[in-house]
Every structure is written in C-alpha cells, then in structure tokens.
Amino acid sequence: MEKKFFNHIIHGGDYNPDQWIKTPEIWDEDMRLMKLAHINSATISIFSWSLIEPEEGVYNFEWLDTIMDKLHENGISAILATPSGARPAWLAQKYPEVLRVNENGIRNEFGVRHNHCLTSPVYREKVRNINRILAERYKNHPALKMWHISNEYAGECHCELCQQAFRNWLKEYYHNDIEELNDKWWNGFWSHRLNDWSQINSPKSRGENHISAMYLCWNRFVSDSHISFYENEIAPLRELTPDIPITTNLMRMHTGIDYQKFAKHLDLISWDNYPGWEERSNIELAVETAFIHDVFRSMKDGQPFFMMESTPSLVNWHDVNKLPRAGMQELASIQAIAHGADSVQYFQWRKSRGGHEKFHGAVVDHCGHENTRVFRDVARLGGVLEKLDNVVGKYSNAKVAVICDWENIWATKHFCGFNNINRNYIGECIKWYKPFYDKGITVDVISMEQDFSKYDLVIAPFLYMLKNGTAEKIEEYVANGGNFAATYLTGLVDENDLCFLGGFPAGRLKEVFGIWNEETDSLPEGMKNSVSYREKQYDVVHVCDIIHSTGAKILGEYQSDFYAGMPAITENTFGKGKAYYIAFRNDDEFAADFCSKLINDAAIAPDCGIKTDGEIFIRKRGSNIFVMNFSEAEAAVYLDKEYTNTVSGEKLSGGISLPACGYLILE
Ligand code: GLA
Ligand code: ZN
C-alpha cells in the first residue's frame, strides 16, 4: 500500500523567524544554512499570535509574507501553524474566561503556553478568526503545503463553562437519564445517588475522586473537548484550503487525549519524539521508541506519519540532559523512517537567544555558523534522506498486532484493587511487543476497536476493560481461525468500570479461552512465585490470576503458595483458532520464549531472511529493509542474498559488520 503527501522525505523542523524580526539579516543566513543542511521544509508561526495580531483586530503579516516568499524562493515548503497554543496578553487581559482554571477553581494568570479553556466561546471564536485570516492570506501561496494545528494539545480546565459542558456531555452519554448514570456509576455505593445533573462537578481531590467510572467519563469528556476545539480550529481551513492536509503534533503516549480517536480527525499523524538517548539503555529506548512509532503508524491503519519534532542534539527539560553520542541522532531518525515516518523534523532550527528553551538543541547553535558537530550531522543525514524517495508513502505490513488501547490506559490506572502500585499497562504492552521487534517481525499496535481479522496473531496484555462488542469480536476472530493471546486481569469490567457478572473473563470469553479466573493474587515487591513451562522456571511478579481449565490445555503451572499445581498458562482450540491465557505477570525472558511458541503456532515468518549477531533491529518498509544497531558494540549482519544499498547503490552480500550506531538500508 502507498499514501503520499510529498514526493520526498521531509527534512525540516520548527523555525521561529518571528524571534528574529529585528535582525532580518538572520533570515537570509537561515536560508543559506537551510540549503546547506538539505532542509526542505520549515514549520512556522507556531507561537506568533502576539506578532500577527498585536492588538485586537490589528494584523501584521508583513514579516510572515516575507518568510513565506523566502521559503518558496529557496525551495522549502511551509508547514504553517495556527497560533492557539499561546495567546497574546491583550486577549487574556480583555477576556479572562479564555484562561484555564485549575482543579481548585483558581483561574490561571496570563503566561506560559497551553493555558486556555477548551470550552470558552470567546477563545474558540478568536481562534477561528485568526485561523480564517491566515487561511485567506496564504491559501494560494505556493509555499503552503500543510497545516500544523496549534501545538501539543494537552491539559484540562475546571472553569464553570467546562463544568457545564461536562454535565451536558454526561447528559448525552447517559441518554438524558440521571438514573442511568446512577446505575452505571454504581452510585448506591457510599450514598452517592444523584437527583440532578447540576450536582455533578469535575473530579478533584477536594471533591469526588473515588468513582472510577466518573474519571473515565472525565477523560472522555476532556479528550472530546480537545477534539471539538480542534474541529473548531480547522473549520475555516477546510473551507478555504480544502486540498491542504492537516495535522497536529502529538506527544508520545500522552494519556490526556484518546489519540486513537483523535487520529480519525487528522489527515496525517505527526508526533514529537524525545527519547533521551544515553540517559537509559539505548536498546531499551530504541524498543520503546519503535513501539511508539508503531502506535502512531497503526492509528490510521499503517498510513505513513511524520516525526514532527526530535532534537538534533539534546533537550533542556530532562532532569539531566545528556548529549547523544555521534551517530545516535542519525540512527534514531532512520529508525523513524523504518517504522513509517515520511519526515525527520527537529525542534528547532535555530536556538532562541533568550527564553525558556535557549539551551535546547537546535540545528544552528548560538555560534550561528555551520561548523559544528550537530550541523554537520544534520546536513549529512539530509543528504541521505534525499536518496530515500522510493520509501516515501510506503506501508509496512504486519501479521501480528498488540492491543494497546487508550481507554484501557485510563481504566487500568483508575481502578482500586489487586496490585495498586504496579499497574504499568503500557510497559506490559511493550514487553509483549519486544520479542517480535527482536525477531524482525512487524507488529501493529492497535486499539480494541480496530480490525483484528487481518492479523494471524493478536496479543492483548492486561485487557482489563472491554468496550461494547469487544468480547464478541475476540470470539469471532478466534472462531474464524485467529490466534489470540491474553494475560492476567483480562475482561473484568465494561466501559463504565462495572464488573462483568458470572465469572471472569467476561461472558463467552470463558469458553473461548477454556478457563475460568476465580481469584487474583498480588505479590509485594520482592515476593515471587514461579511457573514451570517447557522444563524452565519463570518468575511470577506483581499479579497473577488463579484460573481453572474448563477444557484448555495446561502448558504451565504455579510452583508454590496454596495455588501450586494450578494452571498458569493455557491454550484452547476454539472454532478454527486458538486462544492462549497467560495468567501471571512475568519478565522479558518469558515473553520472548512464549512468543517463539506463538510465532511457531501461527506460522509467522520474519519479514526477511537477514540474520544478525547481537541486538540488531530489522524492519521492512515497502521493499526496503532497515538494519539498525542501537547497541554499544559492533555486530555482524549476514545477508541471505544479494542486496542493493539504497543510499549508496552498492551491491552487498555475505557477512557485514555494522558499527555501533550504524545502519543499512537495503533493497
Ligand atoms: C515540545 C514542543 C516544542 C518544544 C519542545 C522542546 O515538543 O512542541 O515547542 O517546547 O517540546 O523539547
Ligand atoms: Zn474552561
């Protein structure tokens, strides 16, 4: 499959010429340097509202006209931002309702960014207005190639407008029936039954904070508020520039917005990637980053995405900001491409002279010239990216999916019980993703609402909450020949965090898995049980279900405690497929060993025949194979046939040694 927004890999990043408006000679120097660095795109005007509308209704676009023209003259496309991420002081002063209110009911003062109410009609109107003016002005400008909406949507507001909006949201969700809400929130508990919608306020530490269903609704409401804020922002853009694609930059596994839902509203997914290389094990970070790339790639069924931000050197906001070693930035950028990115973009082009981010990495440092390590690295990578036109738009096809569902992220966080301090849902998803990445098998990371039928194997770690229809979907998938693996604490509650009655896992899943989960044990830190599986002993940590087989084959049993000898791993043939239940939390070693069995049972082949020594990652995208060495040591790669090096055109075969931070792109 293929979907292209551009014909080349986009190489660019956040560009803030608005900070240098008094020294326009810097703008010319920027153009010279951008060409040297093989930059073909600039994301502009992200935080420029106070410059483009210095007073209410007074507009100043001269500088932006000049920049748009300069970019175009230099063959650089403009990704033009809407400015809602930070507002001018006059706006906050004149209309205080636009400022965010914290959970204690205190309205923030003007300052920082992302400090706006999501509901305020005034703010929505002002944003729509400035966006319309931008679109009108630049709709025919040849540099304009994409819209970048606001910046990193996040946060929540507790003002009276938002409280009312929350009540309205609930009214709609619960069919205007307060008794339905009482039942779904189980409000008979602790005498919380409500008579009227007006009795509801946002959850907070000094108010209601023990109803997990309410927290879920609040998460959904805040997420929907961001989406409707976004829809309000893009309305004039859709009208005036219907052919210009729209994106907004998302942040890693940020849980404040249901990104899987938001994705449907974006033309293209883009995200900001700041792993903090060297600050932990680079291998661990590479796996985590690969997983997140795949989360974003899978949101639109494999459609290529943008890595909208990454740092060309260090960041300034980690506790300790380590410089990455030589080659790491390039390797990390290639990893993004391997996973489906059609861009390598940086925060930021040029360091700000002052302000909060003056020591954040940039392509151009305060020294102002190109004779720096970072600039040279960026320029070299730019040259490589220019050779990758045949990767642009290409998909990677996965036969395996790991479910990591945004609503389940919320649900696994909110409930009280079992092991309250070791939830780590996302970490568990990564644990079950890693064995496939290690083996060069492409994995999609999907929500529970996405299609399972295209996969040979679906793994659902800790699928505590099941949305409407999910249990039936799993049953159908397995009955039709799918392989489905679930772990401990699967299928306990519905979308309102109400427990399923009649035994876990929910409903007919007991037949699908051939088990019944009677109790769940939790193990304090340092306490372990163990499970025997294929002559090996594996640790049981944090949490484990005590299950009975009602027909499933028992593959492993607990070794100690009162449940010694009871099943811990089961396999059940159901219809044409198989369902596996792994009743305990374990470590990477078990996940790797058990995934080997799953891969074998489902007859899944690696994406290519290349073999390696050491921890080398291989990812196929379209007809290109990316081989990446994130380890500290040189490692051997054995090519199973002759390949062409996509970048150099050289023919390669046999054994090759790949240095630390080295990579190969082969066809
Ligand atoms: C975020 C923001 C940028 C910048 C960088 C710094 O991703 O979008 O504006 O603040 O962080 O790392
Ligand atoms: Zn508000």
Image (cartoon, rainbow, N blue to C red):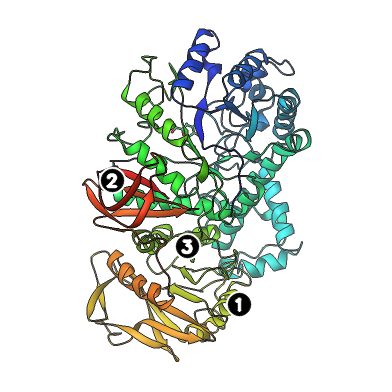
Residue 253 visible (yes or no): yes
| Left or right: 238 as drawn, with respect to 205 | right
Q: Residue at x 24, y 43 (%)?
A: 659
Rounded to the nearest whole Å, what is the CA distance between mark 2 and mark 3?
26 Å
Q: Position of residue 291 (x, y in %)?
A: 43, 54
Residue annotated with mark 2: 280
The three-letter code of the residue at mark 1 reads Glu
Looking at marks 2 and 3 on the same chain, the residue that comes earlier in the sequence is marked by 2
Q: Residues within 10 Å of mark 2 (few under 14, many from 20)?
A: few
**Mark 2 vs ligand 1: CB below 8 Å:** no
Residue annotated with mark 3: 412
The three-letter code of the residue at mark 3 reads Thr
Q: Residues within 10 Å of mark 1 (few under 14, many from 20)?
A: few
Q: Residues within 10 Å of mark 3 (few under 14, many from 20)?
A: many
Q: Position of residue 368 (x, y in %)?
A: 39, 14
Instruction: Give 297 or 273, whichever is nearer the viewer.
Output: 297
Helix, strand or loop at label 1? It is: helix
Helix, strand or loop at label 2? It is: loop
The numbered disc on residue 472 is: 1
The three-letter code of the residue at mark 2 reads Arg
Q: Position of residue 253 (x, y in %)?
A: 47, 50
Farthest right residue in view: 239
State whether residue 223 is above or below residue 241. below
Instruction: Give 566 or 185, whichever is nearer the viewer.
Output: 566
State which quarter of the image contains the N terminus.
bottom right
